[in-house]
Amino acid sequence: MKAMMLKHTLIAATCVAAFSPVHAAGEAKNVIFFLGDGMGPATVTAARIYKYGEAGSLSMEKLDRTARVKTYSNDAQTTDSAPSMAAYMTGVKMNNEVISMSPDTRATDPATGKSYLNGTDSTCPASNGKAVDTMLEIAKGKGKAVGAITTTRITHATPAATYSHVCHRDAENTIAAQAVPGGAGYNAKLGTGLDVLMGGGSRFFLPTTVTGGKRTDGRNLINEMKAQGYTYASTGAELKAIDGKATSKLFALFTNDHMDYELDRVKKSLDQPSLTDMTLKSIDVLGKNANGFFLMVEGGRIDHALHATNAKRALEDAVAFDNAIQAALTEMEKRDPGLKNTLIVVTADHDHTMTINGYGKKGSNILGTVKNYKDGTELKDADGNNYTALVFGNGPNRPATRKMLVEGTTDATQVLHDDYLQESALRMGSESHGGGDVMLFATGAGVASKTFKGVIDNTKVFNLIKQAYGF
């Protein structure tokens, strides 16, 4: 009888094993979400060639799984950063300029056509949509440590979409207040607060009575954050001196506005941390939580350089972003060998209009003029003028009459100069976003990362992360 019972038990166990997944849901204890703002496919390709050559690879390109992501917003073919990042963080399509609110939320008053902003930088009217939960809020509610770091202002659209809810992205005073535990306007869904918040933008945390401050309510939110137990840093040296493993809450504002471009940070020896520095320090702080963590890392100034059609700074920031990805991979492999409990996702919120054109010779400087792949001579347009490999669909540099370009660095009119602006087909004050799909790369957490494949909507990424967490 005992032998028969044992036999049935073994058969039952075999059947369960046969129909059970190899890895159970909820295998991702930690998630690091990397967002290269505006980092469309052409930017990824150009950054690879710029740093490693045509046959090389960025760290992000070596990850196990890839996908293409649709980025359109609820009301536009071409999205801005607010609804595109919010789609990743909430799984909800919303209108352009709206931060983590329901689809019916309007960024402008339909009666007046004016944005929902006033002198006090208020939140949305009660009748205008409702807040929708973000991944950061959900993770916090599950007992995980959470953080958001960026090279832009921390109240800018992308980081704001992780922890705040407003009907217009420009309400940055209101966004800042939502991050301060215990203060007026605090986002209670953050519980005890973000465990890490770092980037630029002290202007929206300081009153107008302080030089550079933009707050009209008289509050000094930096002091309020310190009073809530946050360790504060304002320089790269100060951040380096902080022991992340002994710090429970970390808050840092390194500049009054956006942080400097990577090219300038390095060349001018500015006392600002690299994105890699911020990433590793964040992992130290968040990694102490036994329940795991969620960290959002934004390479935000890629987007700004592209808006200016300054390809060199865009590529430098894209490479710095990729370096942060590699640093995180290396660090998490030490903490979690094989990334069995860590999911890393890398993507962009939208595309730009930069493209790579001409039949350039392999090995040519991607920032330079196009050389004929047959004999290395300058290729010419229909009017007999040479042209650069990188150009934009629109932007500020649209010469009335084109002339021969010089591949030098003496002044900003020469194509290899730090400040050179690539030419554009349409003249505009600032280059616009592009509406094309973006790339996604993912690795870790076993089978969870393998669900990131094919052509998917940006809202699906939110659901895939939730599934990986087991929420």
Image: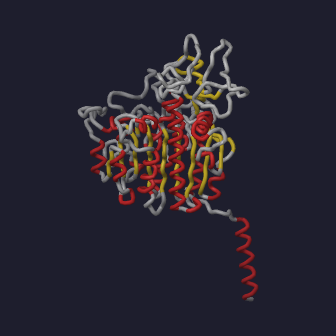
Question: What percent of the width, then of the height, locates residue 337?
Answer: 56, 62
User: Residue at point 33% right, 27% down?
Assistant: 119
Does 220 sit above or below residue 338? above
Name of the residue lying farthest toward the left: 209
Classify residue 233 as left or right of residue 140.
left
Residue 371 picture quarter: top right
Name of the residue lying farthest toward the bottom: 1
Does 48 sit above or below residue 424? below
Does 26 sit above or below residue 32? below
Does 447 sit above or below residue 77? below
Residue 150 at least partly seen: yes
Classify residue 422 as left or right of residue 437.
left
Residue 71 at least partly seen: no
Question: What percent of the width, then of the height, locates residue 51?
Answer: 57, 39
User: Residue at point 53% right, 19% down?
Assistant: 397
User: Residue at point 53% right, 55% down?
Assistant: 330
Q: On the rendered image, what quadrant is the N terminus found in?
A: bottom right
